[in-house]
């Protein structure tokens, strides 16, 4: 059966930035089959119509997250990265049970979907449980099991064990659940020995799997790699062969021009996380320079302990604000380019057929209501685009489809119990704080 969704405006985020007013999108078997003007194109027999009003646009794409960290939201505020990890994050994570992680990911997925994020690229430990929660929630997930040495975790905390587990998960689950894609998540150049990076690179490249890694997040981390290996983290990872496969590098705040050229040469994609980088005082990534080098860039929330919410709308706005403020140029990142970063840009960075409302793409679609001060007035398409970028907000998202399935209906996730997840996380988080 074909479903036609009709709205006052459809932002396709195609290459021309087409906006249809009114507009409609038809979906069959989870895929977009037609996009156009509903007043000019008659309905085919058997098509169901939903006249929604408001705005339809592609679902937002989150390129870097650790969503089960809803359990650690706001832990260690004000600490620099190394201290934050060692004192606020890793001690609590050492106490995590599988059930804790399930509810943490469920709450994170509920928050992401409720805000219109239809794809999330996740890196975390306990990957089997994260996968289960992601599939239950209905979100599209690229899951890259975390690989790094965790002090005090016994054999489970050793990278060799985690790599074996990640390979087994990839071989068993990649692509078999429809919306679940597996990859590999080596933590960072400073937290893994070179032999681990080589082993992960080989395992991922044998499977044509994506690798997600933290890269050049802070200045201090770059100095550690420089002192240890006599070169910067990007050159170090390239020399170990990691960049010979598909790679998504999160943060990339401290890249110089030569390092950007290196990433562009190897077609390494970047997850730009302006909210997390700002909160942890890491710095401001040179978004416009990375784009000028032709690097594929998407946006990331990072984990809820360093953001602290999962509202990709904020990342879109921060990306545009930081780009314009650092360049002292109001044309530095246009509103259309900001919207592309949050949707099509993220999809291209992850290599997924989502992020635009075009024929043949997976039907990952969101609908926003516009009967709100943030969207008033809306005198033309350009100003409506401005409202999306500068005033768009998750609470205006009423409906979400992932692969054509209605996952959020009238603001409520119909697949999971978001209220229970909130209560579970609230209770479990207290135990994780420890004595
Ligand atoms: Zn991260």
Image (cartoon, rainbow, N blue to C red):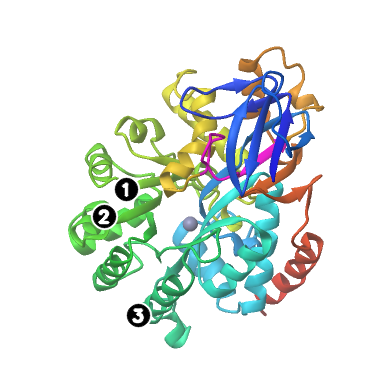
Q: Which mark is residue 243?
A: 2
Ligand 1 closer than 8 Å to label 1 CB:
no
- Residue 374, quarter of picture: top right
Inter-mark Cα distance, 3 to 1: 25 Å
From where the camera sits, is residue 390 visible? no
Residue 360 on the magenta span: yes
Q: Residue at x 67, y 65 (%)?
A: 136
Picture layout, residue 246 above or below residue 93: above
From where the camera sits, is residue 215 visible? yes
Residue 205 image point, x, y percent: 29, 63
Inter-mark Cα distance, 1 to 2: 7 Å
Magenta residues? Answer: 354-367
Q: Residue at x 23, y 43 (%)?
A: 265
Inter-mark Cα distance, 2 to 3: 20 Å
* In this picture, residue 196 sits left or right of residue 177: left
Lower sequence index among marks 1 and 2: 2
| Front-lying residue, 12 or 91 | 12
Picture layout, residue 197 above or below residue 293: below
**Residue occupied by mark 3:** 160
Picture layout, residue 417 above or below residue 218: below
Q: Secondary structure at mark 2?
A: helix
Ligand 1 closer than 8 Å to label 2 CB:
no
Residue 231 image point, x, y percent: 19, 55
* In this picture, residue 433 sits left or right of residue 184: right
Pointer 1 with pointer 2, Cβ within 8 A: yes
Lower sequence index among marks 2 and 3: 3
């Amino acid at each position: 059966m074909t479903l036609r969704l009709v709205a006052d405006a459809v932002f396709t985020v195609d290459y021309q930035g087409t906006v249809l007013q009114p507009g409609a999108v038809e979906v069959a078997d989870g895929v977009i089959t037609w996009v156009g003007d509903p007043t000019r194109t008659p309905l085919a027999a058997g098509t169901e119509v939903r006249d929604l009003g408001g705005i339809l646009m592609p679902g937002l794409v989150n390129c870097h997250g650790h969503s089960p960290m809803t359990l650690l939201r706001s832990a260690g505020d004000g600490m620099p990265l190394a201290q934050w990890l060692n004192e606020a994050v890793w001690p609590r994570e050492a106490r995590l049970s599988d059930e804790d992680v399930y509810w943490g990911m469920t709450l994170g997925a509920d928050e992401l979907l409720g805000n219109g994020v239809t794809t999330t690229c996740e890196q975390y430990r306990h990957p089997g449980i994260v996968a289960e929660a992601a599939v239950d929630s209905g979100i599209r997930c690229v899951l890259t099991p975390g690989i790094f040495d965790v002090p005090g975790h016994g054999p489970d905390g050793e990278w060799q064990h985690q790599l074996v587990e990640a390979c087994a998960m990839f071989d068993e689950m990649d692509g078999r659940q429809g919306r679940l894609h597996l990859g590999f998540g080596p933590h960072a150049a400073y937290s893994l020995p070179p032999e681990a990076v080589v082993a992960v690179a080989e395992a991922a490249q044998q499977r044509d799997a994506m690798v997600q890694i933290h890269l050049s997040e802070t200045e201090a981390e770059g100095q550690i790699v420089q002192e240890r290996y006599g070169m910067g983290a990007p050159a170090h990872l390239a020399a170990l062969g990691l960049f010979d496969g598909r790679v998504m590098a999160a943060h990339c705040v401290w890249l110089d021009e030569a390092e950007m050229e290196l990433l562009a040469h190897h077609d390494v994609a970047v997850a730009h996380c302006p909210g997390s980088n700002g909160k942890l005082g890491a710095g401001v990534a040179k978004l416009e320079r990375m784009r000028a080098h032709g690097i594929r860039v998407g946006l990331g929330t990072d984990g809820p302990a360093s953001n602290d919410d999962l509202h990709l709308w904020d990342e879109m706005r921060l990306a545009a604000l930081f780009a314009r403020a650092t360049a002292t140029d109001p044309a530095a990142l246009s509103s259309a380019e900001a919207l592309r970063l949050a949707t099509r840009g993220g999809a291209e960075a992850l290599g997924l057929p989502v992020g635009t409302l075009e024929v043949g793409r997976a039907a990952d679609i969101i609908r926003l209501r516009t009967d709100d001060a943030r969207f008033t007035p809306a005198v033309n398409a350009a100003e409506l685009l401005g409202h999306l970028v500068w005033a768009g907000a998750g609470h205006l998202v009423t409906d979400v489809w992932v692969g054509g399935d209605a996952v959020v209906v009238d603001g409520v996730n119909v697949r999971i119990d978001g209220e229970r997840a909130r209560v579970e996380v609230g209770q479990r988080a207290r135990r994780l704080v420890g004595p």
